[in-house]
């Protein structure tokens, strides 16, 4: 996961064998694959453009790799019909790509890669051509099929929600460098750098100061309040630091530990979005389920509550 131009697709293409690395080695398990041509690597690619053969029907598109491997017609037919059932497109084997919807074409491209039973399945932003609702559906389908087949998958995307919902582990890249590796939960709530915190979701960045530190705890001064938070980094007492706080973890109320003034209040459907001026800081708040709560208006004085477990030092 990373912004455009960060090197994620180049990395994927190097793994697939379409690009040659200028230095370093690539291993699949304990096997070095740098010098192997793409067809000799135990990988399969699902392309952004699907790359279906327009003159082949669904059956022949999916069967293409098996025919190259010279499997028997009976075995090919059995495998193709089985995988069509897995992806929910049974009975469509005689249709051509131009007779299929975008979501159906995507599933055919996925089936063509899966049927080769690769050691690693490579995805290059495969859902970017689909509409928003279909993207959400296809995310769950890809995850279901990946788990069913038990294949390791490397999935390149700049879409945060795709990365969060699909992955067991996320690699955040920026300008050709890995910024952080972690689970979706770790990446979201415990970002190691300001770039990661800013790139994933929405975050409030506030200036603070380390007052004291012991083992895995630190007391920080945030505005005029001392708060003890979890911290095992290397910042020392009296050092300035930045903390991040996610908008959905901030509580807005009539009175609280911090005082502020509402600068904007916007209904977003599932939550009320507030921008609150609090001393020298501006804090964004996502107050969920606003229908059953007090909605504060612009110019209104409010209180803000922060729980220590929701404050993360970077």
Image (cartoon, helix red, strand yellow):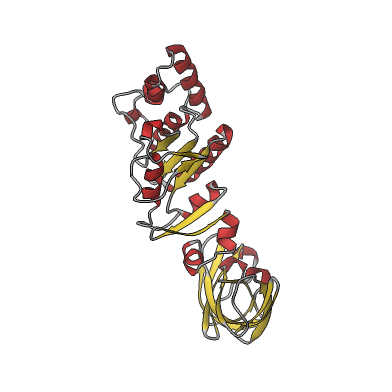
At 60% from the left and 74% from the top, the residue drawn is: 234
Quarter of the picture holding the N terminus: bottom left
Quarter of the picture holding the C terminus: bottom right
- Residue extending furthest left? 55
Please state which of residues 190 and 125 is positioned toward the viewer in this rendering: 190
Q: How many marks?
A: 0
At 53% from the left and 46% from the top, the residue drawn is: 166
What x and y, as percent, mark residue 276?
Answer: 54, 78
Query: Vertical placement of 150 versus 218: above or below?
Result: above
Task: Specify whether residue 32 is in view.
Answer: yes
| Occupied quadrant, residue 296 | bottom right
Task: Specify whether residue 130 is in view.
Answer: no
Please state which of residues 276 and 17 is positioned toward the viewer in this rendering: 17
What x and y, as percent, mark residue 131?
Answer: 41, 45
Query: Vertical placement of 46 versus 174: above or below?
Result: above
What x and y, as percent, mark residue 151?
Answer: 53, 36
Please state which of residues 187 and 43 is positioned toward the viewer in this rendering: 43
At 59% from the left and 63% from the top, the residue drawn is: 189
What x and y, as percent, mark residue 37?
Answer: 35, 34
At 32% from the left and 30% from the top, the residue drawn is: 98
Query: Vertical placement of 65 versus 311: above or below?
Result: above
């Amino acid at each position: 996961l990373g912004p455009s131009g960060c090197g994620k697709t180049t990395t994927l293409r190097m793994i697939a064998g379409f690009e040659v690395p200028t230095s370093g080695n690539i291993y699949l398990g304990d096997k070095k694959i740098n010098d192997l041509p793409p067809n000799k690597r135990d990988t399969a690619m699902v392309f952004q453009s699907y790359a279906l053969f327009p003159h082949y029907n669904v059956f022949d598109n999916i069967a293409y790799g098996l025919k190259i491997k010279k499997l028997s017609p009976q075995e090919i037919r059995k495998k193709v019909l089985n995988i069509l059932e897995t992806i929910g497109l049974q009975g469509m084997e005689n249709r051509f790509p131009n007779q299929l919807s975008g979501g159906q074409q995507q599933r055919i491209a996925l089936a063509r890669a899966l049927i080769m039973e690769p050691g690693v399945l490579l995805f290059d932003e495969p859902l970017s051509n689909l509409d928003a609702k279909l993207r959400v559906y296809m995310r769950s389908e890809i995850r279901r099929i990946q788990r069913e087949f038990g294949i390791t998958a490397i999935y390149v995307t700049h879409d945060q929600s795709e990365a969060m919902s699909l992955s067991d582990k996320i690699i955040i890249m920026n300008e050709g460098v890995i910024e952080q590796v972690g689970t979706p939960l770790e990446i979201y709530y415990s970002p190691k750098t300001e770039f990661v915190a800013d790139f994933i979701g929405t975050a409030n960045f506030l200036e603070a100061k380390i007052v004291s530190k012991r083992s895995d705890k630190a007391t920080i001064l945030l505005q005029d309040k001392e708060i003890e938070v979890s911290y095992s980094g290397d910042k020392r007492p009296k050092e300035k630091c930045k903390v991040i706080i996610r908008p959905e973890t901030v509580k807005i109320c009539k009175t609280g530990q911090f005082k502020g003034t509402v600068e904007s209040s916007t209904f977003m459907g599932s939550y009320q979005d507030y921008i609150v001026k609090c001393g020298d800081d501006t804090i964004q708040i996502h107050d969920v389920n606003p229908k059953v709560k007090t909605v504060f208006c612009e110019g209104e004085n409010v209180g803000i509550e922060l729980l220590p477990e929701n404050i993360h030092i970077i």
